[in-house]
Structure formats: structure tokens, C-alpha cells
Image (cartoon, rainbow, N blue to C red):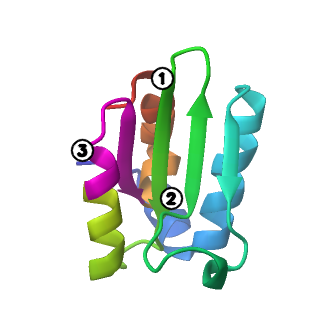
Amino acid sequence: MTVLTPTQRILAKAMTERQLQTHIIAAAAQLGLLFYHTFDSRRSGVGFPDLVLVDRAQRRVLALECKKQGKLPTAAQIVWIEALGAVAGISARVVYPADWLSGFVFVLFSDGS
């Protein structure tokens, strides 16, 4: 479980999915990761994750479904996350603003846990 300070809890609750995606994309770019985001979800399969990041150095893929704090993924999103996560070399999960603010997203970048 992610532990946040009172201030971080307020920030996490206020952060939108779009803001979370923007933070993750900016960090991925700084780390030299390739990333893909379909800006119009009607152009991808129902439930496909928001972000796909490729770490060429570690030869792995990270698929992230970004959610507003407290919002649950849809059934279709869960199917995609579970299916992608079952593939060797791919780490797939749902992330929340709390994961960003606590630094957990950087753990995902570094080791794919």
C-alpha cells in the first residue's frame, strides 16, 4: 500500500487521469523510454491501457492504465491488464496519482515489479 503525507493525499485526490498521464509521459521521455498513448480512445480496442512504455535497454514493456484516485478500472481494462501482464517481458498494471506522488511509478520504471 502506498503511504502518502496529508498534503500528498490532497494532491492525489485532485489529480486528473490526464495530469497523471502527462507526468508519466514526461518522466518516461526524460528516462529515454519510448512511449505510446492513444489520445482518442475510440481508435484503440475497448479497455486497452492508456500508456505503453518500452525500455529498450532492459528489453521490456510497461503497460499502464491511469486512473483518478479512487476510480476502479472497467472489466475490459482488467482483461487487458491481466492479458498483457501474463506475457513475458511485459509488466501491466493500473496506476493512480498516489502511485506517482509516492514514487512507486519510478519503481515500475526501474524494475517492472
- Comparing labels 1 and 3, the label whose residue is closer to the camera: 3
**On the picture, is 43 further left or further right than 13?**
right
Disc 2 or 3, which lies upstream in sequence? 2
The residue where tag 3 is placed is 86
Numbered badge on residue 110: 1
Q: Which residues are magenta?
A: 83-95
Residue 57 quadrant: top right
- Between 1 and 50, which is closer to the camera in this rendering? 50
- Mark 1: amino acid: Ser
Residue 6: give x, y in percent of width and height.
42, 59
The circle on residue 20 is: none
- Name which residue lies at 50% across and 58% down: 7
Q: Residue 73: in sight, yes or no?
A: no
Whichever of labels 1 and 3 marks the residue nearer the N terminus, that label is 3
Residue sitting at x 51%, y 33%: 106
Across and down, in percent, residue 91 comes to: 37, 39
Is 40 rendered above or below residue 12? below
Q: CA distance from mark 2 to mark 3?
A: 36 Å
Q: Nearer the viewer, mark 1 or mark 2?
A: 1
Q: Which residue is mark 2?
A: 7
| Residue under the point 68% across and 52% down | 36
Q: Of the residues tagged 2 and 3, which is closer to the observer?
A: 3
